[in-house]
């Protein structure tokens, strides 16, 4: 698969520790609760708890230009941890030891980011194999049980997990954000 096609998926997030990630004696995480995991010496990534729930995902048959693979279906989640932010170039560099992002100081588009600190930009141009290497390295690091309550595995989110997380975020914003008016 071409390098550029995997970058948005990887930049989106990392799923960590699915349905059985909460130990019975531990209080369940609150929706949106954030925990940090050290992915390399002195470098931490933030993960948010996506609470259990059920939602209809996909698109209705009546949607214009709808693809067959986008059929509506019910998705049920037992809850999981999802990266709060895209994987940054600094995080990638700390784990993998190199940064081949196009929009980095040494990348093919370095002229576009001249004078910009690219450390906090999302990693881009990562292939599936590149992402697999990153995940293997942070999984090999160990220590997830101390942060998430149970040993688990970092993986790329699947499409349903990503879409469910977006819907969950929209619901949380609607519930907890103060009413926004046109004067703000």
Image (cartoon, rainbow, N blue to C red):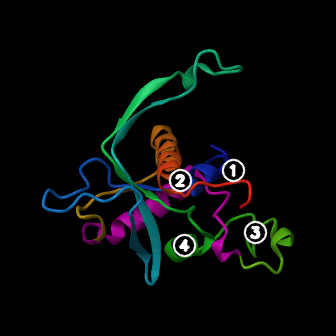
Q: CA distance from mark 2 to mark 3?
A: 19 Å
Q: CA distance from mark 2 to mark 1?
A: 12 Å
Earlier sequence position, callout 2 versus callout 4: 4
Indicate which disc residue 91 carries: 4
Neighbour tally class for label 2: few under 14, some 14-19, many 20 plus, Cα within 10 Å = few
Numbered label tally: 4
> Label 2 belongs to which residue?
129
Are the two marked residues, 2 and 4, in contact with CB atoms closer than 8 angstroms? Answer: no
Indicate which disc residue 107 carries: 3
Name the residue located 82 percent from the left edge and 65 percent from the top edge. Answer: 109
> Label 1 belongs to which residue?
4
Neighbour tally class for label 1: few under 14, some 14-19, many 20 plus, Cα within 10 Å = some
Q: CA distance from mark 2 to mark 4?
A: 17 Å
Name the residue located 36 percent from the left edge and 64 percent from the top edge. Answer: 139
Image coords of residue 77 (percent x, y): 34, 40
Question: What is the magenta segment's predominant secondary structure?
Answer: helix
């Amino acid at each position: 698969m071409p390098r550029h096609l995997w970058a948005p998926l990887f930049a989106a997030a990392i799923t960590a520790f699915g349905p059985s990630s909460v130990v019975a004696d531990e209080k369940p995480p609150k929706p949106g609760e954030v925990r940090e995991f050290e992915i390399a010496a002195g470098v931490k990534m933030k993960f948010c708890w996506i609470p259990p729930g059920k939602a209809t995902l996909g698109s209705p048959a009546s949607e214009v230009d709808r693809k067959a693979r986008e059929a509506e279906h019910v998705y049920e989640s037992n809850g999981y941890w999802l990266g709060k932010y895209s994987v940054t170039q600094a995080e990638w560099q700390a784990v993998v030891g190199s940064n081949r992002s196009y929009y980095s100081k040494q990348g093919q588009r370095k002229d576009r980011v001249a004078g910009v600190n690219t450390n906090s930009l999302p990693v881009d141009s990562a292939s599936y194999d590149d992402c697999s290497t990153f995940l293997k390295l942070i999984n090999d690091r160990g220590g997830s049980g101390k942060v998430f309550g149970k040993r688990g595995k970092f993986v790329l989110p699947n499409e349903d997990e990503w879409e469910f997380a977006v819907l969950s975020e929209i619901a949380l914003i609607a519930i907890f954000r103060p009413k926004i008016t046109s004067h703000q």
